[in-house]
């Protein structure tokens, strides 16, 4: 049984009548080589219940948590079968740690049960989740509306410093990214449109296509999506972090309504800035389209402007701005709602941020579809 | 003399269906320094959240004087809550505001003081907790212990009748912890506040507490209440003895 001591762990199993003796030797450490399982669990399964298990460790060189996990696994298996286990053969340090590990019995209800739902169940769970989202969003819209009413009644209070900071954050600071995206979207619209139109020699209609496309649809949509990723996520993270730090509780105990103090200025700032950003995005998109038209398809700038005037009406601009304002409300509410719902850990803040963006983009696209259908039916 | 200030009756604390503590019954008298004690994770912070109206009990009542915290309208509850000052376990200073703004916010909200008077009051409160001169610092720019003290200054902003402290001395050095204990006692004496403290600092418990409740995580209910010094002298419960003597009188007798 004595072998060359090599870096690794060895376990030998000696079974005599009613006594199982486990001899441990070598290095039982995290870094040592792992031996193959020698069927110890099978041996324990077959022991008579009167058996006693003991350990021999004279040749044990080195040990750490690896030994402890092996021992707890073995002891658990033995105690499940009602076998008696003698620990006195183990080093004193190991005995001490094992005593600690078994000092407080594991609380059976402290373990969270994770069950994998079946197909039908998961469909049902999804449906319930959608329903919960709708309910919580409607509830939150209700709270925010009450808060706006309080504002007009002069009873809702937030700090004007905060408000102007949010205005700057979702206004001026958003300009670079809005500029870039809108310019590019305008150029893409122009290229896609021009490719089709040039087949009929009708490149001049690029102006109308880009104009209508940007003003009615893409300007608003792109601004909404940019702000969902930029501001909606920031709102969720800010409010979520305040939840984690008990700052929201502190507001409540001071008698300050967190919806008034945290949600209202954020929603108002975004709703105020969205139309402005939308007009700016429209202009940038059309500029992008014009660049393509003028440089690649030989349209003169005055022709472009003339065509634009012919096709783009005030109606179209108004529809775009209206849509964008709706997106602003949705983005701000989704961000704040997810922040307020945030759990009390930093992981929860990450989840809240992700879910704020996903919720906002879903709502933007869904509400855009509804609004497009309505405006088409009404011929606006 | 002993006039009840907060009465907790048949209170059960739960997160969803997971019961943390059940059947809590105790009374905090006016002018008490009331200690909530028990091992880590037994639900002390949760009990505090129920007493200040942040969480609705699964069963039972919290009475402030005659009024049940959860029997009155939301507006009335907000008014009751404003009579309380709370120091949270994490300090919970509003991180986007300076210390001065943190303390000034409730003052600006609920008093008619002008900005200069508020500024003066803020400086006074900060000086009381030993943070004079830190008015324009942001919470992230001061140490954890200083954040605790600033949180205390904010909790005292409106001179509340009842002050709640969640582990005030955790994270403080022994001298600062002792100073904080002295501060708590002098607040009680000078303002006549009732004080409820969650703590497991034995030194604090015996130095400041004159009434207490002991929560047990295993049986999930309170197993003792009363003056902590009396509990130490008279309680026959081995779990209480073990806690109050740092385990020297261990429940198993070793
Ligand atoms: N949001 C939550 N959801 C579910 N369970 C929770 C939640 N918060 C706390 N708990 C559980 O409630 C129990 C009591 O938590 P609590 O924070 O009140 O303990 P505590 O006595 O204040 O502990 P400590 O002394 O460590 O601060 C813990 O077992 C914890 O797991
Ligand atoms: Mg706690």
Image: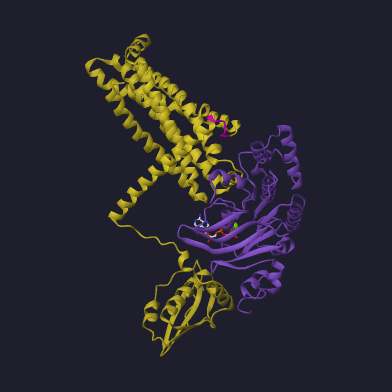
Chain colours: A yellow, B purple
Q: How many numbered tags mark residues here?
A: 0
**Residue A270: percent from left, percent from top:** 49, 30
Pick whichever, A45 or A4, lies toward us: A45
Look at the magenta stretch and give its main secondary structure.
loop
**Residue A60: percent from left, percent from top:** 53, 77
**Residue A283: percent from left, percent from top:** 42, 19
- Image-quarter location of ligand 1: bottom right
Position of B176 with respect to A54 (left or right) is right
Task: Tell me, yes or no, whether the highlighted magenta stretch contains residue A153.
Answer: yes
- The residue positioned 46% from the left and 41% from the top of the image is A337
Q: Is residue A370 above or below residue B207?
A: above
Task: Tell me, yes or no, whether the highlighted magenta stretch contains residue A12.
Answer: no
Query: Visible in this render: residue A190?
Result: yes
- The residue positioned 55% from the left and 50% from the top of the image is B54
Pick whichever, A114 or A9, lies toward us: A114
Pick whichever, A310 or B218, lies toward us: B218
**Residue B130: percent from left, percent from top:** 76, 47
Question: In the image as oriented, which residue stretches furthest toward the bottom?
Answer: A17
Position of A118 with respect to B172 (left or right) is left
Query: Visible in this render: residue A266?
Result: no
Pick whichever, A88 or A313, lies toward us: A313
Location of the N terminus of chain B (image quadrant): bottom right
Q: Is residue A365 above or below residue B11?
A: above
Q: Is residue B78 above or below residue B209?
A: above
Position of B86 with respect to A64 (left or right) is right
Looking at the rendering, the stretch of residues picked out in magenta corresponds to: A152-157
Question: In the image as oriented, which residue stretches furthest toward the left?
Answer: A200
Quarter assignment of residue B102? top right
Location of the C terminus of chain B (image quadrant): bottom right
- The residue positioned 67% from the left and 51% from the top of the image is B162
Q: Is residue B239 above or below residue A136?
A: below
């Amino acid at each position: 049984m004595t072998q060359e001591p090599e870096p690794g762990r060895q376990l030998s199993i000696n079974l005599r009548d009613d006594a199982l003796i486990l001899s441990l030797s070598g290095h039982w450490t995290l870094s040592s080589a792992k031996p193959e399982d020698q069927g110890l669990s099978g041996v324990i399964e077959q022991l008579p219940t009167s058996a006693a298990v003991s350990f021999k460790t004279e040749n044990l060189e080195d040990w750490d948590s690896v030994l402890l996990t092996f021992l707890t696994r073995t002891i658990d298996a033995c105690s499940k079968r009602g076998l008696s286990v003698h620990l006195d053969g183990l080093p004193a340090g190991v005995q001490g740690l094992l005593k600690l590990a078994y000092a407080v019995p594991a609380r059976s209800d402290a373990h969270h049960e994770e069950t994998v739902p079946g197909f039908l169940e998961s469909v049902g769970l999804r449906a319930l989740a959608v329903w919960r989202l709708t309910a919580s969003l409607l509830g939150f819209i209700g709270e925010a509306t009450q808060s706006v009413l309080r504002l007009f009644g002069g009873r809702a209070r937030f700090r004007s410093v905060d408000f102007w900071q949010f205005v700057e954050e979702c206004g001026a600071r958003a300009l670079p990214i809005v500029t870039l995206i809108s310019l590019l979207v305008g150029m893409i619209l122009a290229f896609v449109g021009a490719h089709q139109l040039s087949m009929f020699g009708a490149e001049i209609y690029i102006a109308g296509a880009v104009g209508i496309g940007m003003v009615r649809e893409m300007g608003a949509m792109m601004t909404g999506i940019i702000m969902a990723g930029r501001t909606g996520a920031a709102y969720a993270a800010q409010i979520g972090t305040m939840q984690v730090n008990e700052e929201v509780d502190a507001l409540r105990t001071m008698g300050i309504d967190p919806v008034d103090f945290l949600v209202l200025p954020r929603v108002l700032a975004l709703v105020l800035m969205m139309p402005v950003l939308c007009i700016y995005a429209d202009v940038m998109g059309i500029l992008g389209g014009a660049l393509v038209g003028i440089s690649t398809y030989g349209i003169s700038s005055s022709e472009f402007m003339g065509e634009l005037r012919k096709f783009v009406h005030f109606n179209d601009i108004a529809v775009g701005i209206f849509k964008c304002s709706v997106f602003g409300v949705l983005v701000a509410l989704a961000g704040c709602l997810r922040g307020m719902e945030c759990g009390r850990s930093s992981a929860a803040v990450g989840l809240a941020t992700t879910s704020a963006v996903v919720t906002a983009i879903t709502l933007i696209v869904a509400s855009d579809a509804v609004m497009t259908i309505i405006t088409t039916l009404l011929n606006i | 003399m002993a006039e009840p200030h907060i009465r907790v009756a048949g209170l059960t604390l739960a997160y969803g269906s997971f019961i943390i503590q059940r059947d809590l019954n105790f009374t905090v008298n006016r002018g008490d320094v009331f200690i909530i004690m028990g091992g880590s994770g037994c639900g002390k912070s949760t009990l505090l959240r129920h007493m200040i109206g942040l969480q609705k009990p699964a069963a039972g009542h919290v009475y402030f004087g005659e009024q049940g915290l959860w029997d009155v309208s939301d507006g009335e509850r907000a008014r009751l809550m404003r009579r309380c000052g709370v120091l949270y376990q994490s300090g919970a200073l509003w991180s986007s505001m300076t210390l001065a703004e943190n303390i000034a916010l409730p003052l600006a909200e609920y008093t008619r003081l002008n900005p200069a008077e508020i500024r003066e009051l803020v400086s006074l409160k900060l000086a009381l907790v030993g943070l004079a001169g830190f008015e324009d610092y942001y919470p992230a720019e001061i140490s954890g212990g200083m954040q605790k003290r600033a949180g205390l200054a904010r909790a005292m902003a409106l001179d509340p009748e009842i002050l709640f402290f969640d582990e005030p001395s955790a994270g403080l050095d022994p001298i600062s912890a002792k100073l904080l204990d002295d501060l708590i006692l002098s607040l009680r004496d000078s303002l006549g506040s009732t004080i409820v403290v969650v703590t497991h600092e034995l030194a604090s418990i015996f130095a400041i507490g004159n009434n207490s409740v002991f929560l047990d995580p295993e049986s999930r209910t309170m197993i003792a209440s009363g003056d902590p010094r009396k509990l130490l002298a008279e309680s026959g419960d081995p779990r209480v003895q073990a806690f109050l003597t740092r385990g020297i009188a261990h429940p198993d007798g070793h």
